[in-house]
Image (cartoon, rainbow, N blue to C red):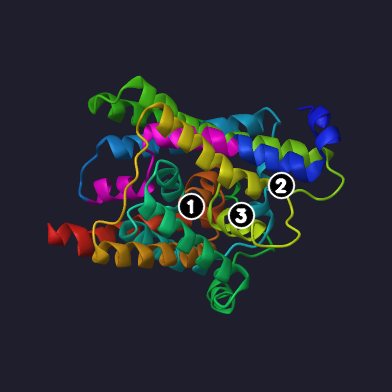
Amino acid sequence: MDILWIVEPLGEPATAALFGLITGVIFGVAAQRSRFCLRAATVEFGRLQMGDRVAVWLLTFSTALVWVQGAQLLGLMQAEDARMMAVPGSWSGAILGGLLFGCGMVLARGCSGRLLVLAAAGNLRSVVSGLIFAVVAQMSLVGWLSPLRDRLAALWTTSGGRNMNLATEIGLPDWGGLAIGVAIALFALELSRRQSIGWPRLVFASGVGFAVAVGWVLTYALAQVAFDPVQVESATFTGPSAHTLMFFLERDPVLEFDVGLVPGVFLGAFLASWLTKEFRFQGFENEANMRRAMLGAAMMGFGGMLAGGCAIGAGVTGGSIFVGTAWLALFCMWVGAIITDRLVDYSAE
């Protein structure tokens, strides 16, 4: 894909930020209109209800697989070049961080990506929770919490200096990932039919998965023509939230994909909520809910950084290229969320 006509006038850093912005806007619009939320899906599943939220999540996950694996077959990207595949992964981080993130998103009533979308629609609870999430994520990356994160992540790591490619390990053919995506999508569509989910919501649910593919393809294309090394990455919100926060606090900020992604999601979700007249300011119901949300956001900030990604970064973006620790982290997020809902919410009803 020829992108030199974009890179030459803008420069590599600005192009990376522009690609992040494009990815983010698509994601923001699609996530707001589809009401995509891993927390809602896990709670519904944990209560033995295969409803619309599970259907939307499965459709998003499967279409991400289809788009990304299809792009790989067409040579538009290579999973082996992705940053999260090219570095060692942490099994212990995926387990502990995934469980912690799953607990946190139930307490905060939304994963990090969902909080950003809700904040753009006027939810002030999500604004507060999102800021706490970003601060704790930054502390876990390079601050006071980073030594603890490093120790926990080092307990059990992948071998060979790289993450594990599950597709390669289980011997999937080149088209195997695409086939798995199609199979899950067909199941999600049948579940959607039973739940009478309208086609607009289905289109937007698949749009979230499409946004993930857009990020992978655009950053891969930039990496092929850039003079300096460029990370091949896509939508995730733990690291990008921390990086975007520091971008506005540092004297000499650096443009990158992350810095475009987070504002892009906010912009897309804001426009979608405003145009559909769903934008409205909301606050905390009471002090107890505020404490709960703040604790959950902090748990997600540390857990997401430890796990190597959030519900989107590990759960959809990493999963779409079969990153081993991402799939494990996603499983542990489901487990942590279901257990927390059972102990905190379900038992109280």
Q: Residue at x 77, y 46 (%)?
A: 13
* Image quadrant assignment for residue 246: bottom right
Callout in the foreground (3, 2):
3
Distance CA(mark 3)–CA(mark 2): 24 Å
Location of the N terminus by quadrant is top right
**Amino acid identity at mark 3:** Thr
Distance CA(mark 1)–CA(mark 3): 26 Å
Distance CA(mark 1)–CA(mark 2): 18 Å
**Amino acid identity at mark 1:** Trp
Q: Quick check: 14 above or below 26?
A: below
**Amino acid identity at mark 2:** Asp
Q: Residue 81 bears which disc, if any?
A: 2
> Where in the figure is residue 88, as x and y percent of width and height?
65, 62
Q: Residue 244 bears which disc, if any?
A: 3
Q: Read off the residue under disc 1.
A: 327
Mark 1 or 2, nearer chain start: 2
